[in-house]
Each structure stands twice: as structure tokens, then as C-alpha cells.
Amino acid sequence: MLETINRYILPQVSSTFAADVDALFTFINVTSVIILLGITVAIFYFSIKYRRKSEDDVTPVIRFNTMLEVTWITIPLILVLIVFAWGFRGYIDMRTPPGNAYEVYVTANSFFWQFTYPNGVQTTDELYVPAGRPVKLIMQSRDVIHSFFVPDFRIKQDVLPGRYTTLWFETLTSGEHVIFCTEYCGTGHSAMDGMVYALEPDEFNAWLNEQKELSERELPLAELGRNLYTSQGCAGCHSLDGSVVIGPTFQGLYGAERQFTDGTSRVADEEYLRESIKYPGRVINVGFNNIMPSYEGQLSDDQITAIIEFIKELE
Ligand SMILES: [Cu+2]
């Protein structure tokens, strides 16, 4: 019965430690409910049994009862120790990635996730992993504190700027699972989600090789720019169809007159676009907030040229 209830109140069980986490969670829940019921019943029973029956019915003064004291110290102590030992064992397991784990680098940005695979392939907001094999995530943030959370795997870890944190998991089967950022990180926090795709190992290898080939192909500048637009997270804040997401749309941007909060204005030429990408805080568009991360040092000059070329084609 408990399993049926869990299936409704908990996310899917999709990693090797998910079942153990759920078992401990269930143990804590069930014990709490039993204790709650016991106390509630005792309160009603005592309040009826020992209610005041006459005017001179006086409560005796009980100063100490060794038996009672020992009981209500020992039972909670045993329960807490069980929870501690159980939780600690699970914690050690979750914090110790096996030596043969497949490693993926994770970079958190406001407001998207970047994944870098050992062969240099990069993806945004989509993490591909081999199913049934331990995967270790080596995580860092480019700006503020984010937190990587995959409910189906029961894993969650803060991702910090200037410091690595790690996580590991092994999926039970192939499948798709949702990623959330679970640290309130700014205006785009609610959009900072993604997907884990666990593929069968040979499917995964085929995918990885295909991505590698795609990334090595010599692309025309504008097409390369379009790829950077998605892989660098611009897509999370800038639309191509005229709609306003978090930042202004790229549609019709090139050559348009831009108005800034300091009262100045400027035509969006190559120079302006490059500056906006490298130093987004210098001028702020009217109606927008200064939240775009700087891409200085993150994108090479050639990559910025490719993006500018891409924007120019969006007449
Ligand atoms: Cu975040």
C-alpha cells in the first residue's frame, strides 16, 4: 500500500539511489504518523479518564517517574539514531562517485545550463547520458548561485561561482527526466529548466560522435552564429520572432535605432552589437533590466562576429 501511495506523491524512481531515499522518507513519515496518532489517542483517553469528577478532586503532585523518563528518552533516541545511520549511509553513497563514472562538466549561467562532454561537444539545457552507467557531474557557476535538481534521481546540489561541486547518479533505464534550478537566481529563474536524456550506451555513443562531427563541420558564419545563439543561451532571453522574452528580440534589431535609460540613443550597427555582447551593462535598453551576463572572455572575437552575422540576417 505504501508503495502505491508513494507512486502518487513522489516523482518517478529513476536512479540507483532513489529507492533508498524513498524508503528512508517513508520510514520517517510512517513513524511520525504512528507517534502523532499515539499522542492524539492518549490525549483523548487521559482527558476523559482523569477529568475532574467532583469539587474536591485534586490532582496529585508527581515529581519524578524514572520509568517514564527512561522510556521517552530511549525511544526517540533509538529512532533518531536509526534515521541518522540510514541517512548517513545514503549520504556517503551519494557523495562518492565510482571511479569509472562518465564525467560531464556543467556550467550554470543566468539562466541556462551548459554541458560539456569529454570529447568537447557542448549542449545547452539538454544533458545526454549513457543509461545504466555512473555519471559524474562536475559543476560550476559563471555568475550567481544556482542549484542542480533532478527530482526523478533524488539528487540536488548547489552550483557555485568560483568553486566546483559534484554530483553523481546512475539511471536504471533509458528515459527522459526534468532538470530544475532550485536556487532562486533572478528574473529568469523559472525558465531555468532542462532535460536529462538517458540513452542506451551504443545510442549514446552514436549521438556523441554525431555531435562531434556536426561541431567540426565548417559552417557559414551566420549558421555558426545561429548555433551559438542556442548553445550560449541567448535563446533563453532573446527571441527571433519579435516577441519580448527577458531581453529585446533580435528580429529587425540590426540597423534599428535603440533608446537607452541614460537618455542617449544609437543605431544598432556591428560596433554596437559587439559591445552589447561583451559589455551589456554599459547602456541599458529602455524597458529592460541590466541582467544580461557579459560574454567577454566567454566568446571569442570570431564567435561574436558569427553571432553579429546571424543577427544581420534577421531582417
Ligand atoms: Cu538558476
Image (tube, grey):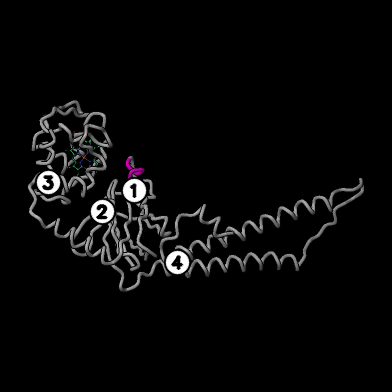
- Foreground mark, 2 or 4? 2
Residue type, mark 2 in image: Gln
Q: Which residue is mark 3?
A: 223
Q: Earlier in the sequence, mark 1 or mark 3?
A: 1
The picture places residue 310, in percent across and down from the top left corner, at: 12, 41
Q: Considering the numbered disc 2 on the image, is that residue within a helix, a strand or a loop?
A: strand
- CB within 8 Å, label 2 to label 3: no
**Looking at the rendered structure, which numbered label has been put on residue 193?**
1
Q: Earlier in the sequence, mark 4 or mark 1?
A: 4
Work out how far the residue at label 1 is from the one at label 2, CA to CA, in angstroms.
11 Å
Residue type, mark 4 in image: Tyr
The image shows residue 51, relative to residue 272, as above or below, that is below
Q: Earlier in the sequence, mark 3 or mark 4?
A: 4
Q: Which residue occupies 41% across, 61% down?
A: 14
The picture places residue 240, in percent across and down from the top left corner, at: 20, 37
**Looking at the rendered structure, which numbered label has been put on residue 91?**
4
Q: Residues within 10 Å of mark 2 (few under 14, many from 20)?
A: many
The picture places residue 92, in percent across and down from the top left corner, at: 43, 69
Which stretch appears magenta?
188-193
Residue type, mark 3 in image: Glu
Q: Earlier in the sequence, mark 2 or mark 4?
A: 4
Work out how far the residue at label 2 is from the one at label 3, CA to CA, in angstroms.
20 Å
Residue type, mark 1 in image: Asp
Q: Earlier in the sequence, mark 2 or mark 3?
A: 2
The picture places residue 224, in percent across and down from the top left corner, at: 12, 48
Work out how far the residue at label 2 is from the one at label 4, CA to CA, in angstroms.
26 Å
Q: Nearer the viewer, residue 10 or 255?
A: 10
Q: Which residue occupies 23% across, 54% down?
A: 123
Farthest top residue in view: 263
Q: Which residue is mark 2?
A: 114
Q: Which residue occupies 77% across, 65% down?
A: 65
